Each structure stands twice: as C-alpha cells, then as structure tokens.
Image (cartoon, rainbow, N blue to C red):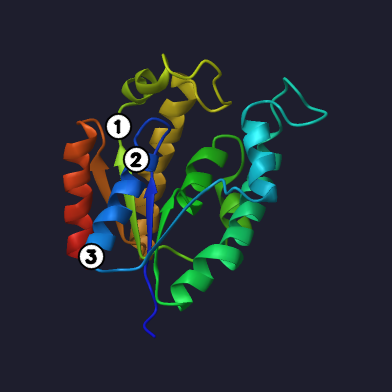
Amino acid sequence: MATGRFIVLDGIDGSGTTTQSKLVAEWLRGKGLEVVETCEPTRGAVGRVIRQALSRALPGREGAEVEPELFALLFAADRLDHMNATVVPALERGQWVVSDRCYLSSFAYQSTGCDLDWVRTLNQHARRADLIILLDMDARAAYDRFATTRPNREVFETVERMTAIRANYLTIAEVLGREGDRIVRLDASPPAEKVAEEVSTAVSEFL
C-alpha cells in the first residue's frame, strides 16, 4: 500500500486553522482519499495537561502560568505520542493525515520564551509534514475574531504575544523552507470560504 501524506494547517490563534483543517479534509475525501483528522494539543493524556496549563488550570498551579520550558517539554512529549499513536500508523496504512497544528507551532510559540535551537532539538524526532499551510494574518485582527466569544483567554491569547508569535512564524517558516520543508503561506484574513479556496488550490498543486 502506498504511503499517505501528512498535511498541517498552522498559524496564530484566530487564524482559522481548525476551520480550514476540517474543510481541507472534506475536500480530500471528495477526491476519493481516506483521511484522518487530528490536532495538537491532542486529546491524549499529555494533551489534556497542556490544555489545563494553557487555561491556567493545571492542578496545583491553578491561576498561574507555567514556565516556558515546561510548555516546550509538554508539547514535545504530546507530539511524540501523537506521531507514534496516530500520524505515522495512519500514513503507513496509506491514509492522508490532516493536522490542526504541529511542530511549527512549537517553534513559533515556545521560542518566545525558550531558545529556538533547544525547542527544535526536543522535536527532532517528529515526522516532518509533507505540506504545511501557514495561515497568516495581523495579530490584532485575529484577536478580534475571538475576543467577544471566548470569556477566558489562554496564556498566549494577547495581542502582544500573538504579534511576537506571528513574527516567529514568518521567520521560522523561511528557515524551514530553506531546509526543505514545503510551506505555503496564505492570507487568512478574508472570509473562511475564500481562504478555503486558496487552501484547496495549494493542496491541489501539491497533489
């Protein structure tokens, strides 16, 4: 059986990664492909701890923000489990995997508080994506998309942090592109339907 392909939708909070990952999975199924949809943080044991930490609800640390190094370690551990339990087995079965976020997120988010080279070392065993679609948009505009619908903000959901994270995405995407990663940067600011058209075009060119 042919090996499947691994596609990742990534970008700052509010850029539409969850929406677009679902839409591209549906689009691929329409092409007759078998698709596994997944996300990071995962719904596994480590992923649940991460979600608690993001919401400042980690048992014993309620209300406090955990250290940047701890976030980096947690995300790397969750990713390795994700690769071994979900991504690689699906690819070996010949399925296509569409993930809402992966290692590029760690590089962009965790390098705001940690050394990027160290974060990359933690993630060196993660399966590289065959295609990363970077949904890029202004941090303020992205923040405004969820500001009125999410009463509780996660630790990275401030305009200041999102601005820094966006800058990291753009810089690191260029580096990874030079290293051989296939990364397509798309404007995520138009309506979701328009962005979906651009995403499907990018995937179609990849196909």
In this rendering, the answer to whether 196 lies above or below 6 is above
In this rendering, the answer to whether 147 lies above or below 17 is above
Instruction: Quickly name the residue at label 2.
Output: 19
| Helix, strand or loop status at disc 2 | helix
Expressed as whole percent of the image width and height from the top left, the position of residue 135 reads 31, 41
Q: Residue at x 52, y 38 (%)?
A: 109
Label pair 2/1, CB-CB below 8 angstroms: no
Is there any visible trace of residue 129 in the rendered image? yes
Whether residue 8 sits left or right of residue 198 in the image: it is: right
Q: Residue at x 45, y 77 (%)?
A: 93
| Helix, strand or loop status at disc 1 | loop
The quadrant holding residue 66 is top right
Spatial CA distance of label 3 from label 1 is 23 Å
Expressed as whole percent of the image width and height from the top left, the position of residue 99 reads 43, 54
Instruction: Quickly name the residue at label 3.
Output: 206
Closer mark to the observer between disc 3 and disc 2: 2
Q: Counting residues from the N terminus, which is met first, the one under dot 3 or under dot 1?
A: 1
Residue type, numbered disc 1: Met
Q: Residue at x 67, y 33 (%)?
A: 52
Spatial CA distance of label 2 from label 1 is 15 Å
Instruction: Quickly name the residue at label 1.
Output: 137
Query: How many neighbours does mark 3 have within 10 angstroms: few (below 14), some (14-19), or many (20 or more)?
Result: few
Whether residue 61 sits left or right of residue 186 in the image: it is: right
The quadrant holding residue 98 is bottom left
Expressed as whole percent of the image width and height from the top left, the position of residue 26 reads 29, 54
Q: Which mark is residue 200?
A: none
Whether residue 13 sits left or right of residue 84 in the image: it is: left
Residue 19 vs residue 140, the one in the foreground: 19
